[in-house]
Image: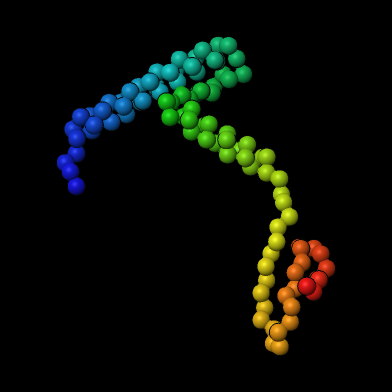
């Protein structure tokens, strides 16, 4: 292992401070601006943070995938040893048994 790079460490600290200050300042500005424009938001805080936009994008993308899911027929394999040997039974879910 190497010693931590103090420049990188300070850059991370600075980024955390900037994220917090930008989030607090813009949340306040955005909440007041939108409250004046849309009275129905009277008591709501409209939060903002530099990390929220990409995180929201990931959530929306996952939601879209889930909503767009189309179920498909699938095969289920069940194996049971039979003595003396008999041919395997192959069937789709919900279909009658067919001896192959």
Q: Compared to 13, does 75 lie above or below?
A: below
Q: Which of the image's four quarters has the C terminus?
A: bottom right
Q: Residue furthest right?
A: 96
Occupied quadrant, residue 7: top left
Q: Compared to 62, does 72 lie above or below?
A: below
Q: Position of residue 52 (x, y in %)?
A: 46, 29
Q: Position of residue 54 (x, y in %)?
A: 48, 30
Occupied quadrant, residue 39: top right
Occupied quadrant, residue 67: top right
Say which residue appears at 71% left-offset and 49% top-offset. Answer: 71
Q: Compared to 32, does 63 lie above or below?
A: below
Could you tell whether 45 is left or right of 25 in the image?
A: right
Say which residue appears at 54% left-offset and 23% top-offset. Answer: 44
Q: Position of residue 6 (x, y in %)?
A: 18, 32
Say which residue appears at 31% left-offset and 27% top-offset. Answer: 15
Could you tell whether 17 is left or right of 1 in the image?
A: right
Could you tell whether 48 is left or right of 16 in the image?
A: right
**Front position in the image: 49 or 47:** 49
Q: Compared to 94, does 87 lie above or below?
A: below
**Front position in the image: 45 or 51:** 51
**Front position in the image: 45 or 1:** 1
Q: Residue furthest left?
A: 3
């Amino acid at each position: 292992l190497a010693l931590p790079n103090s420049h990188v460490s300070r850059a991370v600290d600075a980024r955390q401070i900037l994220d917090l200050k930008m989030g607090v300042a813009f949340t306040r500005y955005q909440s007041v601006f939108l409250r004046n424009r849309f009275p129905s938001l009277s008591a709501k805080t409209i939060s903002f943070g530099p990390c929220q936009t990409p995180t929201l994008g990931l959530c929306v993308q996952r939601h879209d995938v889930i909503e767009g899911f189309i179920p498909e027929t699938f095969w289920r394999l069940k194996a049971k040893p039979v003595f003396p040997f008999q041919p395997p039974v192959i069937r789709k879910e919900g279909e009658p048994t067919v001896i192959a």
